[in-house]
Image (cartoon, grey):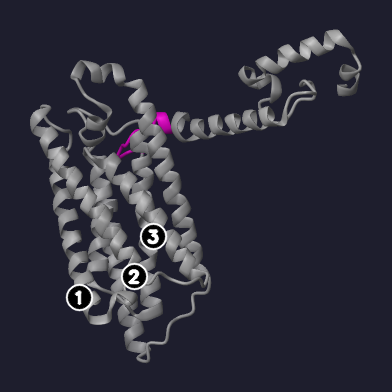
Amino acid sequence: MVAERVEGGGGGGSRCGEDEDDSLFALHDIYDIRGSHTLGFCPNLENSKVMMIERSVLLERGVYWVSEHPSVVGFRWSHSATWASTWSFLLTSVTAYVTSALLLHLTLTTLFRRRRPVPLGPIPAVHSLAMALLSALIFLGLLLSSAAEIRDTRWLWRRRRLTPLQWLLCFPLGTRPTGRVFFWSYLFYLSRFLHLLPTFFAILRRRDLTFFRLFNQSMLICMSFVWLEFSQSFQVVAILCATFLYCVVYGYRFWIGIGLRPACFGFVVNCQIVVLGCNLVCHIGVLLLHFNKGGCNGIGAWVFNSVLNAAILLFILDFYVKVHFKKGPQQIE
């Protein structure tokens, strides 16, 4: 079929030129619904244009799945319709986490006094890789969904004299936990339960269990739940910062898990300090907007979030100082 068109002569050549100019704007003439090549495209279409069309189609599909899919756009946080959305589930899961971690630690320290590490094989490395990829997905999905929300609701912001940056820090009063942004906030909340697994890895490997680890993981789950329950302001920025941090930290842990050389400084702790410090600076912006723009939604939950971030930052700084001066920076993770 293509050979016959090439042999067709001058009329076919001019037609191919026209098709070539319109090819970038008629993606469905090049691809069918499933994305496969049709047999009728112009034979002298340059490879660069074909590659550009392929990338644009893949990009459009990716954007659709993370920000325009009906499941994303139509999400609604509801105690009756959304899994793991009740206070009883939250309290039960946190209690179960703390209890199981304490029981495992007590059992191993009682039965195995020599503290031999339990072999875990590639499980921690696989977990780190999975968490890095999941965090990257949440980061990208929330970023594109935020851009879509800004695009769709800009007319309303002009009436309220809001800018996109102000919206990211301060949701207007009356904001409901529905739509794209809260879908990714919900996925981030569910991913918090996967962050609990390194606690058990540390117990099995080193019999290591600290109050800070239990407190930090438990409160972060509660904080993610509160974001959704009260449509708290500032959660978009907080999730973007957290998922970016997790991409870097879990990628670094995967790097170490497959046997590559670790950093000569406290990589994970330093990343946590930087992100928490940036969060505290953004909290000041939320407070200013709350008093200057007529109020931010979920300000009570925001106060809880601010106190929690400050407490976690103090714990990390205390840990950093103690370990840095006792063991040296090379032994801090």
Most common secondary structure along the magenta stretch? loop
Report whether 94 appears left or right of 40.
left
- Picture quarter containing residue 74? top left
Judging depth in this view, the residue of 136 and 13 nearest the camera is 13
Residue type highlighted by circle 2: Phe
Report whether 50 appears left or right of 321.
right
Judging depth in this view, the residue of 288 and 217 nearest the camera is 288
Residue type highlighted by circle 3: Val
Q: Quadrant of the C terminus?
A: bottom left
| Circle 3: element type | helix
Judging depth in this view, the residue of 104 and 69 nearest the camera is 69
Instruction: Please tell me how crowded label 1 is: few (under 14), some (14-19), or many (20+) other residues with Cα within 10 Å.
Output: few
Mark-to-mark CA distance, 1 and 3: 21 Å
Residue type highlighted by circle 1: Lys
Instruction: Point out which mark residue 265 bears.
Output: 2
Q: Quadrant of the N terminus?
A: top right
Kindly identify which residue carries mark 1: 322
Identify the residue at horizontal 42%, vertical 39% (top origin): 141
Task: Answer whether residue 229 is magenta in the image.
Answer: no
Report whether 279 appears left or right of 137.
left
Above or below 182: residue 41: above
- Picture quarter containing residue 21? top right
Residue 139 visible to the viewer: yes
